[in-house]
Image (cartoon, rainbow, N blue to C red):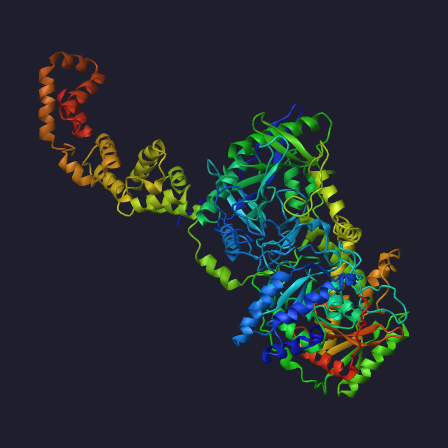
Amino acid sequence: MLDLTFETPKPKVFAGAKHDWELVIGMEVHAQISSQAKLFSGASTKFGAEPNANVAFVDAAMPGMLPVINDFCVEQAVRTGLGLNAEINLKSAFDRKNYFYPDLPQGYQISQLYEPIVGEGEVLVELGGGKARLVRIERIHIEQDAGKSIHDMDPHMSFVDLNRTGVALMEIVSRPDIRGPEEAAAYVTKLRQILRYLGTCDGNMQNGNLRADVNVSICRHGQYEKYQETQDFSHLGTRCEIKNMNSMRFIQAAIDYEARRQIAIVEAGGSVDQETRLYDPDKNETRSMRSKEEAHDYRYFPCPDLMPLEIEQAWVDDIEASLPELPDAKKVRFMHDFGLTDYDASILTAEVVNAAYFEKVMGTASDGKLAANWVINELFGRLKKDECDIVDSPISPAQLAGIVALIKSDAISGKIAKDLFEIIYTEGGDPAEIVEKRGMKQVTDTGAIEAAVDAIIAANPEQVEKAKQNPKLAGWFVGQVMKATGGKANPKSVNQLVAAKLGL
Amino acid sequence: MSDLTKLTVAQARDALRKGETTSLELSDACLTAIEGAGALNAFVHNTPELARDQAKDADARLQAREAPALCGIPMGIKDLFCTKGVPSQAASNILGGFTPEYESTVSQQLFDAGAVMLGKLNMDEFAMGSSNETSCYGNAVNPWRRAGDDTPLTPGGSSGGSASAVAADLCLAATGTDTGGSIRQPAAFVGITGIKPTYGRCSRWGIVAFASSLDQAGPMTKDVRDAAIVLQAMCGHDPKDSTSADLAVPDFEAALTGDIRGKVIGIPREYRMDGMPDEIEALWSRGREMLQDAGAQIRDISLPHTKYALPAYYVIAPAEASSNLARYDGVRYGHRASLAAGEGITEMYEKTRAEGFGLEVQRRVMIGTYVLSAGFYDAYYNRARRVRTLIKKDFEDVFATGVDAILTPATPSAAFGLGEMTDADPVQMYLNDVFTVTVNLAGLPGVAIPAGLDAQGLPLGLQLIGRPWEEGDLLNTAYALEQAVGFVAKPSKWW
């Protein structure tokens, strides 16, 4: 198997008025666990239900109601941990994080502060150009989501929708290993890709199913290396946490803004306050949400309603054995087995459904590069135009493989192949049969092509003279021949014959 | 039959099966007794219609000879249990008007066993108190009085209404809950039997939570046999409560042989408190002798961390309570304060909780919030948890030496006068739990039974503490002691 090696990228450098600065970024990604039922209540997690339709007594924190863990959510968290090469803790425990808010009916969120279910792992974040950052994962824990407060429906009242209350989240906490806005977005993209491969989170950022809190600080060159040697945070600047971002673009823009804001403060002789900030995409700026002094005292303590969560190694092993092939491995295999470029393999493995489609194409196709071109350029392009999902593609992998095979065997030209693609896309059918029936086959019979060339030359003596003076005009003859043969002549043969007959 | 209300559960069960009475007669007799006992303030919400319906159902089942264990037995349910369609307020104003859409597992199991619910019983607000004086309904009153003195006395707490109702024969049995002694202390104050089973024996689902790691439901009954019968129906594994134990429930009544020959009874030296009244000391000694006379072997034992139990309890219980009571915020149910113009959510929380919670509840919420705060967590909460582990280990060590049960006084005094402790340091009130909290901290079963009267004619109780999950064995020891004590006194009716 091919083994990819990557170069560690340099951190992004921000030029201040006085110095150059580097960024240090750590992220907490909240990923909604894919599950039919909530973490502790059994209520549905279906998105888009009527407000307060998916609410069990437990979610509404009725008196005397008790949480019962949903084992499937635990399995999903374990699966995620295994997918991130992380340590699985056979014993973990739930804690209560106490604070008052109307969309938090219990007055506490059940989370895992002291003993998370997943320990240290890692994510390889490729950045192009043979560069990749290995981002360490500190931990993953399971927790409940809160509900939604709605403040803009009535001038005097606020409303609360508890549908989301108690939905299971995984909080995936990275080490401060990310060194620039683009890396941060690439990290979330990669994490999202792995979660989607694992089927543990749908990664739908628009619906808030994947959200990121970003911790940003600035430092001078060399400071980060000192932190790495000692793991002593005092070498780094004071960090600010930008909360709840649900778009890759906003993540980059917010970090960029925040970096410049902190640099300006420090260069003016000030100091950055540790605080929680919110990003405003309309104004492209971050704003203080609460300072360290205003920070909640969450009074975490072990949740007495739940026993410590104990799982067995054999169960973890079973989950591990059922893990799908993950993006890095799949990409390497595609490059190795199908002769794809890094670029094409990356595109084809970005989504597991795309990779599965391509793999089916390669079940019969022999030229990986050619097949990849057709899947990426023609199929993806056409599907995108129709806003059609690949799983609903009108062209099956076998049909696409058929088209590729016809091109590969010189039976049809690339141009005809595009027509054929469109016919099959709209009407269906077997590629070889269609080519046969509709006479789309490429003319490779040099006798027939020669006759056509001779006829054109004979009919255009003036053009012949001009072409002899200026060989570039040979293209005109090629075009005429193609026109005369209805585009079915093999362009390579036509080129050769025209050149020979004109004595070029 | 006359004096139906004076029957024990076992006697009523037999009378019903023999057709000597009906559940409707029995229930009506109780309902009449309740109506005449307003002065006791034991019941805070009566459910006569429900009771009669359930009684008629029970009579039909009795007729059909398909009667389950508690078929037709009229009971009272502590207000801490959520009962479907019946107001359930934990004796707190903050749950004013709250009527649950669900039935607690324990009350449902009682109904499944054929029990009849007469109404909801008074208690200290959110089960926080030892005198029933923190109830939003005003205190229940002890049916007992000191000889020649009509000072109203406390029935104890928090299950004071349950204690008063059973002692005054308003119902045949009642449910209680016990977080630090809330079944055993009131049982002792009114001369009845109360058992707190092993933590995890009864489901907590549908019981308003006070301190989740300590709360357990249990029966309050006229004698040990009744405790065995009612507990049997109350307990068992419940998948809706993650802390409920998935263990088979043995036949507790069948364990009541009265034969305790060869059993080893431990007498913990640390329970001999400074300033303990001589009467309590004497009662304890008599209990020891009676058990010895019944063939048990008496052994002096040590539970060295006992003195740290009360402080640890008063850190852990308020800590959990401060979190458990956060849900009473006026947003979804119960009381909500009215707000002035310009006031927002913070004012709503503050006013609602200030108006809805009584002072003792507020005190404990504040203590709990404090001990969990950043900077204090290790010094208080974590240290208390470590103490708890040591207390548990004290008991494990003793049981490992072959001790079967431990005998202690149930309370440091007889029932005190209502209002007597109102102005005292709250710690004086907390001291009521000194013999009982260790059992909750260790999660063990403990039973209080009446063992005699003090010089003023008030009942005094002894406590037996058993091995985890050995309620049958514990009840049998209690049964042997009960036989030896022969406690038959009843309060004279003044209400």
**Residue at 80% across / 58% down in the picture?**
B133
**Residue at 67% across / 73% down in the picture?**
B468
Q: Is residue B405 left or right of residue B234?
A: right
Percent from the top left, x then y, of residue B63?
A: 54, 75
Q: Is residue A42 left or right of residue A344?
A: right
Residue A20 to residue B185: above or below: above
Q: Quadrant of residue B132?
A: bottom right
Q: Nearer the viewer, residue A385 or A475?
A: A385
Residue B158 to residue B222: above or below: above
The quarter of the image holding the C terminus of chain A is top left
- Whether residue A195 can be seen here: yes
Q: Nearer the viewer, residue B395 or B346?
A: B346
Q: Quadrant of residue A157?
A: top right
Percent from the top left, x then y, of residue A323?
A: 44, 54
Percent from the top left, x then y, of residue B409?
A: 81, 73
Q: Is residue A352 left or right of residue A366?
A: right
Residue A213 to residue B71: above or below: above
Q: Is residue B142 left or right of residue B31?
A: right
- Whether residue B403 can be seen here: no
Percent from the top left, x then y, of residue B14?
A: 62, 79
Q: Nearer the viewer, residue A497 or A203?
A: A203
Count of residue discs: 0
